[in-house]
Image: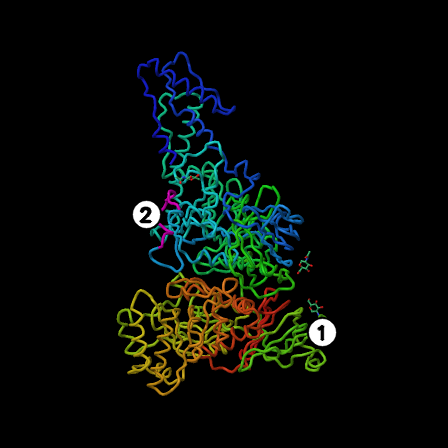
Amino acid sequence: MEKDALSREPRLEARRPRSSKRVWPVLAVLVLAALYLSTEVAFLRLDPRKSQVQVPLHAAETLAKCRSLNLKPAPPVSFSSRLQSDRYEPGTKPVLIRNASIWTGLDGGKDVVRGDILLEQGLTKAVGNVDSLVNYADVAEIDAKGAWVTPGIVDVHSHIAVGSSPSLRGANDGNSMKGLALPWLRSLDGLNTHDDSYAHSIAGGVTSSLILPGSADAIGGQAFAIKLRSTTERSPSSLLVDPPYGLNGSQVDFDTPPRWRHMKHACGENPSRSYSGTRMDTVWSYRQAYEHARQIKNKQDEYCSRAVAGEWNGLDDFPEDLQWEALVDILRGKVKVQTHCYEAVDLDAFVRLSNEFQFPVAAFHHAHEAYLVPDVLKRAYEHPPAVAIFAAFSRYKREGYRHSEFAPRILNDDGLKVVMKSDHPAIQSRWLLHEAQQAHYYGLPENAALASVTTNAAEVLGLEHRLGFIKGGYDAGKLKYLVIWDSHPLALGATPLQVFIDGIPQLETPFTGKKDESQAAPITPNFDEEAKAAVQYAGLPPLEATHITSGGVLFRNVSSMWRRDESGVHSVFQTKGAEDEGIVLVENGDIVCAGSMSSCGAFVDGGVHVVNLEGGSIAPALVSSGSAIGLQEIAMEASTSDGAVLDPLEGSLPSVLGEGSIIHAVDGLMFETRDALLAYRAGVSTSVTAPISEGLLAGLATHFSLGAKHQLEREAVLQDVTAVHVAIQHSGGASVSTQIAALRRLLLGPHVGERGTWFEAVTNGKLPLVVNVKNADIIATLLKLKQEVEAASGTPMQMTLVGAAEAHLVAAELAAANVDVIVTPPRSFPFTWEGRRILQGPPVTEQSLITTLFSQGVTVGIGHQGVEESAQLTGWSARNLRWDAAWASIDSQGLISMSDALTMATTNVEKLLGVTRKAFDCDMVATRGGELLSFEGKVVAVTSPRRKTVDLF
Ligand SMILES: *[C@@H]1O[C@H](CO)[C@@H](O)[C@H](O)[C@H]1NC(C)=O
Ligand SMILES: *[C@@H]1O[C@H](CO)[C@@H](O)[C@H](O)[C@H]1NC(C)=O
Ligand SMILES: *[C@@H]1O[C@H](CO)[C@@H](O)[C@H](O)[C@H]1NC(C)=O
């Protein structure tokens, strides 16, 4: 852009005999240049002996440009004294938030101000005590009643709008496949304005995001920070936060410090996959690109030193190249280098690159192995990069296999800056705060956990003068991005009461009926030993439990106990206070006594193993469903996975399978996968898993123990076949009506082969049909098909829906048809067009999908929250079922009790998916320090009457 401006400048032609007329412009330029130049630049010389020196007309501008080359990004000098935000929308009322607990982000995240916040003209005018409002006629007052206020959540890694939600082919602008190094591309140019994610993210308190190109390329292009609110202009440009000057070709003021730019890089698997290359190719493409940029930079520096010395002769155009100028800016320290890099090999290579070409790295994103190589990061040029990571999302590919949930606290302890990020829509940005909450649960201190999605994130973007802090008065930072929370932001299910962007409230009629009296952060367990082991074993610490197979185990100081029966989960006892000690005695995995020391004491003999739960709980073990857990280790490594079944609607099946074949998940089970063992250690003791399938007919699901070693162990497989699983979806393959036609035939017959036998059982109501479906129209069709089948067979058929994003639209009809639902994900997101009509839940809608179904009398089970659509990518999230269930209760404003939530994650899942075992012999989970469905309890044991063990962790 600058180049275009310069090349249009008229120039004096060299070697032309000079007429007197031409002397004046030269002198004028000289005088101008002298005025322009700052003192440190040498005065232009005109060597009398070399009267040939031709000073070009643009000399002054060129010299200014030369001076600007090494200006570092900074806010303009006037930034801190402005009286109105540049983003102020006329007509926005001043807002006074009274009596808030204000987490300011200052003092390393330890500063809390109890008081008021005054927002005016898009700025924070005061923080603390606002006594007088004499000058304010029309102020909107909010009584926060002591609620927490934080800076708006900042997401440093998002693909909002360069893709779209719902996902559509017409808005797939995140990755160019036109080369490995494409630093000239800009995410802004692909930023669609119709992504449902904007509003969705705001509902989670996210106010700004860095929109990165994808990771298909080694250098994928420039990223841009945006705020998420809609603007009156409705353009992508109007969303930008501090965009680099001159984006639209307007003349840059060379004396103003520039604004930060951002460049996406990606290491490892992704660019290798996109270009059928290797890590070696990717790193060479970086070096080649940076070498090219370095040559341009050197030419510029040489040019400028000659220009400054007045040696204009032979100086042609300023050496620039629009394709490479952004990389030159990196070498000049004007760009935040944002790099997707997972493994030690990649981190090491990129740190070498940063030293070879001498540029700092703002952050490594993903960085699943950063906690194993902190010294490598500390060797990076100029300063250690921040690490922008996930809490638990991992093992989907080899690069993330050694992920540790303790990475945030380990890195923080090592003095590295920790940022939690979403990679939206991988993890949905709306739940970014939940990433910080999980990091906190696993040991990241409170101040660092809050900083990880606010102040640290703002610093990684170079936007700490605008975002990430709350500062009042005429202080440097004037924040107008903030969130009022209904509970402590690190408490499970914390929901915005209001979100301000540019001082403008974003939630029209926020629904939150929940009241958290304590407003305190959860007191999380101690994981020091586990964190140490994660490093010691390079990310693969042993996960096997200690099995107690003989003698009793006495759980002391048990505050609460829950038990299952056929109707669900019920409270057995709640102790009254610290003095009142609950006791649970287990023998051979069986609970033989529960109550007080006086009632159970007689059963206790000398040899018992004593476990103090320190006020914890005993509750039924949870049941996972809907993921590929037990059928794979690493989703994206075919050699570690059972693989997908063949779809009978897509070509004929191999003849060796014979007519009417059907696949049994139990035949492909693999035990002791890390997802399974980690879920087990999080109180999920069994899973119902169907064969991995992308088509109509998945096959027969199975119910098995996540803590077992192999299939032949006692009670490793609890039920070979639980139900027939199918999916009806807009897949882009066979039409929905074709899929329905096939399903109708499968149900009504003729019943061929083994498949026919199982479908006949479904038709006769002996086995549930589990249908993976999102769309309300398809659900309606399924309800009609059910009627048709029942009319033909004369028997009620059992049908369960899984997913069912749009089921709230037909909730009453589902209840009437006796069709129940495993809600997956429990917090809806419009991933696809067919599932776009979601209920967002509080604070946007009063009802969620779960509360709507529940209040209509539909039996609800809770599936996995997971990632995008694929069951294959969700095994890691089984361990979070305890929190997803708790959250369903918290979000329900009193409708769904904790025992209802436990029921939804245990008996209901089993009942809806065809598990026929009896409730009395189920596994139980012991948690220390708090409840299973909380951020305070730590799972320390699973007792299993069927496997006759107590497994201690
Ligand atoms: C602030 O709110 C808390 C909680 O509702 C209340 O106890 C306290 O009295 C309030 N303080 C003021 C100054 O209103
Ligand atoms: C270009 O952007 C600048 C702000 O960077 C703005 O002041 C100017 O009006 C814009 N020009 C046009 C033609 O849009
Ligand atoms: C139970 O544990 C809690 C939490 O450690 C403690 O405060 C309480 O005193 C304990 N109660 C008994 C009876 O030991």
* Tag 2: amino acid: Lys
**Mark carried by residue 178:** 2
Q: How is the image coloured?
A: rainbow
| Left or right placement of residue 656 versus residue 525 in this view | left
Q: Where in the figure is residue 856, as x and y percent of width and height?
A: 48, 76
Tell me, yes or no, whether the two marked residues, 2 and 1, touch with CB atoms within 8 Å: no
* Tag 1: amino acid: Asp
Tag 2's secondary structure?
Answer: loop
**How crowded is the residue under tag 2: few (<14 C-alpha within 10 Å), some, or many (20+)?**
few
| Left or right placement of residue 757 versus residue 599 in this view | left
Query: Residue 585, can we see it?
Result: yes
Q: Is the CB of mark 1 within 8 Å of ligand 3?
A: yes
Q: Where in the figure is residue 780, as x and y percent of width and height?
A: 37, 74
**Mark carried by residue 580:** 1
Q: Which quadrant of the rendered structure holds the N terminus?
A: top left
Tag 1's secondary structure?
Answer: loop
Please, is residue 145 above or below residue 12 in the view? below
**Mark carried by residue 560:** none
Magenta span? 171-186
